[in-house]
Amino acid sequence: MKQLVEVTEAIELLERTPGLLDTWLVGVSEPWLSAREGEGTWSPLEVVAHLAHNEETDWMPRLELVLQHGESQPFEPYEREGFRTRFPGWPLERLLPRFSAARRENLERLRELGLKPVDLNRTGMHPALGRVTVRQLIAGWVVHDLTHLAQIARVLAKRYGEAVGPWREYMGVLGDRPR
Amino acid sequence: MKQLVEVTEAIELLERTPGLLDTWLVGVSEPWLSAREGEGTWSPLEVVAHLAHNEETDWMPRLELVLQHGESQPFEPYEREGFRTRFPGWPLERLLPRFSAARRENLERLRELGLKPVDLNRTGMHPALGRVTVRQLIAGWVVHDLTHLAQIARVLAKRYGEAVGPWREYMGVLGDRPR
């Protein structure tokens, strides 16, 4: 099925995220996986749990909702800490296959939909953000991955924030704000 | 050879970076690889070129220098844009194996050195930053990778900075400064 360039470009990045996390984090020792940049922030392990939870409940289910109901049925609010009840204490080795499987299914479904240009302009209702388009939703899905990949890099880096000594001033990531 | 925990932890992340970049970027279409967050900033492809150049000239050669000469022989200043003359126009498929091979060699050498606790406190002279320790250098090497991984995520994300529409406010990476 011929896909729109907006869709194929998004899929290019989305399909790589689980493998990337696998290469990056599996086998890395515990102090890295549980590093934190401040109270109430997430460790790399928690970021992966969030991505898995998010993948099962957020972007693709919302996209289907827009295509079926437009703005008439607003999205369910997203539970930011929902991963804690869904995957309590799960290790990386369990979380990653779960994320990977959900991502694969979602991208298969996205490809099957064979969105047309007019579909990208269809609108749904976000409970906090208001009217959003399918185009924005797909871009948001991609940028959501990237914001969390940047987060993992930042959290890992900050573990050595003091250790780098005078090199600190060259390491921009150390100055990025916690989130 | 028994290694210090500071060394094994650093190696855990350092040895994963080439594979991570391979999983992330190989096969991704050109607009992603050449995306830029502003004038004078680097695209993901240029970041990889910088990492390859850096790996051949920066951290490990400097570590050897400290161990051999201490502060008596300051480091060569690092040429930030040096990758442009070393790898002019090289595609990702040529840059990544180059980076990967240099990284592998450097980590083999680091393991061979079998650094002892006292070695971590040995000092060298950075041309701009002044006195630095081996401990700081090893941490800096790790954080340098991570700052550039965060950069790639940020640059890719900003390509969709407008496209995400109202989701922008949830996507922290879009607000991180260009570097």
Image (cartoon, coloured by chain):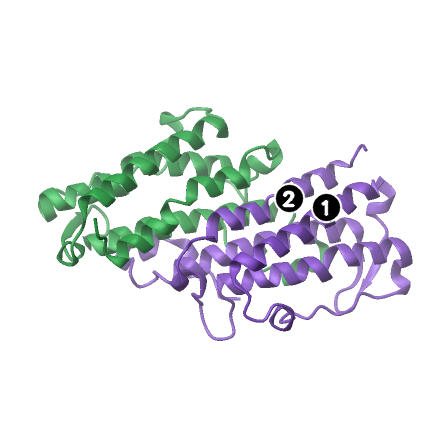
Chain colours: A purple, B green
Give me the residue at 36% from left, 51% from top: B12
Q: CA distance from mark 1 to mark 2?
A: 7 Å
Side of A114 where B160 appears, left or right: left
Measuring 64% from the left and 44% from the top, which residue is drawn there? Answer: A15
Q: Nearer the viewer, residue A174 or B177?
A: A174
Q: Is residue B125 above or below residue A154?
A: above
- Classify residue A19 as left or right of residue A135: left
- Three-letter code, disc 2: Glu
Q: Which residue is mark 2?
A: A15
Asked if the residue at tag 2 contacts the one at tag 1, i.e. Cβ–Cβ closer than 8 Å, the answer is yes
Q: Residue at the location (21% across, 38% down)?
A: B76
Q: Position of residue B81 (x, y in %)?
A: 37, 35
Badge 1 density bin: few <14, some 14–19, many ≥20, Cα 10 Å: some
Expressed as whole percent of the image width and height from the top left, the position of residue A157 reads 40, 57
Q: Quadrant of residue B98?
A: top left
Report whether mark 1 lies on the same chain as mark 2: yes
Looking at the rendered structure, which numbered label has been put on residue A145?
A: none
Chain of the residue on which disc 1 is drawn:
A
Q: Which residue is mark 1?
A: A107
